[in-house]
Amino acid sequence: MRGIETKKVRVINKETLIVTVDISKVTNVGYCRCPNGEDVKPFSFMNNTRGFNTFWDRIMKTKNTHDLKDVVVGFEPTGPYGEPLTHFMRKKKVKLVQVNPMHTKRVKELEGNSPNKTDQKDPKVIADIIELGHALTVVHPEGPAAELRRLTHARERAMQRRTAIFNQLQDLVFVIFPEFSQVFKNVKTRSAIFILENCPAPEDIIKYKLKNLTTILRKVSRGKLGEERARELYAAAKTSVGTREGRQSILFEIEEILSIIKATEHFVAELEKEMSHHLEKIPYSRFILSIKGVGDITVAGLIGEVGDFREYNTISEMLKFSGLDLFEISSGGHKGQRRISKRGRPLMRKLLFFAAINTVRKEGIMHEYYQGCLARGMLKMKALIAVSRKLLGVIFALVRDHSGYVEDYTVEHELKKAA
């Protein structure tokens, strides 16, 4: 694992060539700046092998002309568009850095005292930030951690598609059978899906008859639903005010949506199986899994986002990386509220938040801490964020100390000391 920890880079000296790139999907814009302030006019190159070789030749020509020893290549994070260039440059003897887009947005007004934003201006602004010493190292997960990051992001996209398609399903069902959502509050349940697959229209439900409907619901819900729910559904179908115009077309689309949902759920299940498989290859994962309420998917997602917990020296670095570090805006007599910065990885915060919900339940490891936060007057949301921060600290400590989680650690420690 190389360079997994995101740190500030301040190694710009009189023998360093600063090279910056404004990355786009098709055409990138490169820029070179020498230590004496002399620069090379921004130039374009394509996002392909030929373009990358042209870019590298330009770098080496400038470096040799000015007799420089080191090269720092910087850019803004641009998602997938920057990955080919990053992969290409990792094989060269350069130091890769990145700058926060928010810093670029603010510093660009210093260039010509104008908010003007162009592909020619942006590389120069990035170079200014690097010179100021505010660049960050580039995170490169490798091996199983890299696989976990890809799988986690794929699962997140699939879950987003699933949510969107369920919302679409609810809208279509409401048109032909608005009372359905009053009987089944959650369309995602097994029973609701079964009804929509077999008798989506009110008249289909009436044809089933009450007795058969009761038997089917009891079987599909594994005994959770019975005659009472069947009566509600049957009565709603008989008095439905759903539209009949264009109903056949809507039913056709509902059928297609249900098949997409089924395929998406199968895909998510396969992703989760792969995540568990790669998680087994990471030795320290078992320490995190020892925490009650934190499962395979959460741990796999966290490792995928972080890369390698062992490369971090302090919990404050991890809090900042996740965007859970605190800040306040105070001035004079005004004391601002402390909030999380949210300038880290959003998916990491999401995973920790849902893990926090699991651990604050009764008999959960964070239940007492959570209740203590509420007793001090914290809102539930803020208390859960406090638990997320605490949970990240516990995970960091377990990996650092190569230890499993001990629920009654204080009591056990005291007993050992007494012995």
Image: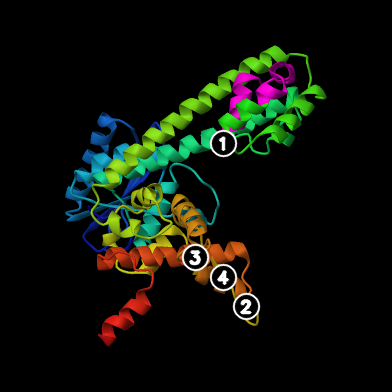
Give the main secondary structure of the magenta stretch: helix
**Residue at image mark 3:** 387
Distance of mark 2 from mark 3, alpha carbons?
24 Å
Mark toward the viewer: 1 or 4: 4
Name the residue nearer the viewer: 294 or 348: 294
Distance of mark 1 from mark 4, alpha carbons?
32 Å
**Residue at image mark 2:** 335
Amino acid type, callout 4: Gln
The answer to whether residue 223 is left or right of residue 303 is right
Q: Which mark is residue 125?
A: none
The answer to whether residue 375 is left or right of residue 209 is left
Distance of mark 2 from mark 4, alpha carbons?
26 Å
Provide residue 109's location: percent of width, then percent of height.
Answer: 52, 56
**Circle 4 Cα neighbour tier, 10 Å, few/some/many (<14 / 14–19 / ≥20):** some
**Circle 1 Cα neighbour tier, 10 Å, few/some/many (<14 / 14–19 / ≥20):** some
Residue stretch in magenta = 189-213
**Residue at image mark 1:** 163
User: Counting residues from the N terminus, which is met first, the one under dot 2 or under dot 3?
Assistant: 2
Task: Give yes or no for contact between labels 1 and 4 (Cβ–Cβ under 8 Å).
Answer: no
Give the residue drawn at x 33%, y 83%.
414
Q: Residue 371 carries which label?
A: 4
SS at mark 1 in the image: helix
Task: Give yes or no for contact between labels 2 and 3 (Cβ–Cβ under 8 Å).
Answer: no
